[in-house]
Image (tube, rainbow, N blue to C red):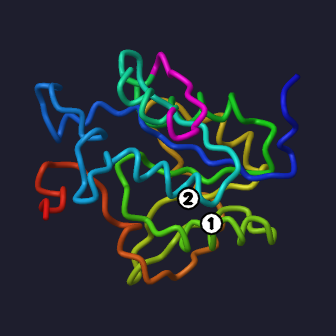
């Protein structure tokens, strides 16, 4: 019997990208690169989300067994998106299909390990208080993760391909929450984005 999550918010961790800008050869998975703490990029991203939400669904691409194993060990529910190559929209819709009975979702990216737990909690609290779409704002720039209430599920499920949720943020009102957290704007795209090891 499936758990009833209609009264709770669920984390979605998008960790299905190829990271070709990090390593075009595909030999180095950016999500598994170590941070100065020794943790993998994706592990840090997941742990922050798990600290504030009771359930996190992590989307991985086919063949990414090491990423899946890392996230499963932390307590994430793993789902493999066969169409991950088509883009973030496909991964998001795939994840929502696994967690469609939630009150809403906080959609985080596996390559953004520096978002503070307080920021995540603030976003979840805004959703719990009735916000439809929430996004953090750092120094006037909108960042990630982004949260959605259940009322936007039909629009989310219409996404696909490389069209992530950005279109919804342009079409519908967004509750922007100012945060003093540079992590909402920092992702690991290239080797230069990794902090130097101490």
Q: Secondary structure at mark 1?
A: strand
| Dot label at residue 134 | 1
Residue 117 location (% of width, % of height): 53, 67
- Is residue 81 a member of the stretch shown in magenta? yes
Q: Is residue 166 above or below residue 62?
A: below
Residue at 78%, 49% in the rendered image:
150
Q: Are marks 1 and 2 in contact (CB under 8 Å)?
A: yes
Q: Residues within 10 Å of mark 2 (few under 14, many from 20)?
A: many
Determine whether 160 is above or below 12 in the image: above
Q: Quadrant of the C terminus?
A: bottom left
Q: What residue span does the magenta drawing correspond to?
A: 73-83
Marked residue nearer the N-terminal end (1 or 2): 1
Residue 146, disc: 2
Q: Is residue 132 magenta?
A: no
Which of the 4 image quadrants contains residue 52? bottom right
Q: Can you give x and y, in whole percent of width and height, for residue 74 in the image?
A: 51, 41
For residue 29, side relative to residue 120 (left or right) = left
* x 12%, y 31%: residue: 24
- The image quadrant where one finds the N terminus is top right
Locate residue 24 relative to residue 140 in the image: left or right. left
Q: Position of residue 128 (x, y in %)?
A: 78, 66
């Amino acid at each position: 019997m499936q758990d009833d999550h209609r009264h709770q918010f669920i984390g979605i961790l998008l960790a299905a990208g190829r990271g070709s800008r990090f390593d075009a050869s595909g030999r180095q998975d950016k999500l598994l690169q170590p941070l100065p703490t020794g943790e993998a990029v994706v592990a840090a991203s997941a742990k922050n989300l798990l600290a504030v939400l009771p359930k996190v669904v992590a989307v991985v691409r086919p063949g990414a067994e090491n990423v899946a194993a890392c996230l499963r060990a932390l307590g994430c529910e793993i789902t493999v998106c066969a169409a991950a190559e088509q883009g973030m929209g496909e991964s998001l819709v795939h994840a929502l299909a696994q967690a469609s009975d939630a009150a809403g979702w906080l959609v985080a990216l596996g390559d953004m390990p520096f978002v503070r737990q307080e920021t995540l909690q603030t976003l979840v609290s805004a959703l719990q208080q009735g916000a439809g779409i929430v996004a953090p704002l750092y120094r006037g720039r909108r960042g990630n993760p982004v949260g959605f209430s259940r009322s936007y599920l039909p629009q989310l499920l219409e996404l696909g391909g490389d069209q992530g949720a950005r279109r919804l943020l342009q079409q519908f009102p967004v509750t922007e929450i100012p945060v003093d957290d540079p992590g909402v704007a920092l992702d690991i795209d290239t080797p230069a984005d990794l902090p130097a090891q101490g």
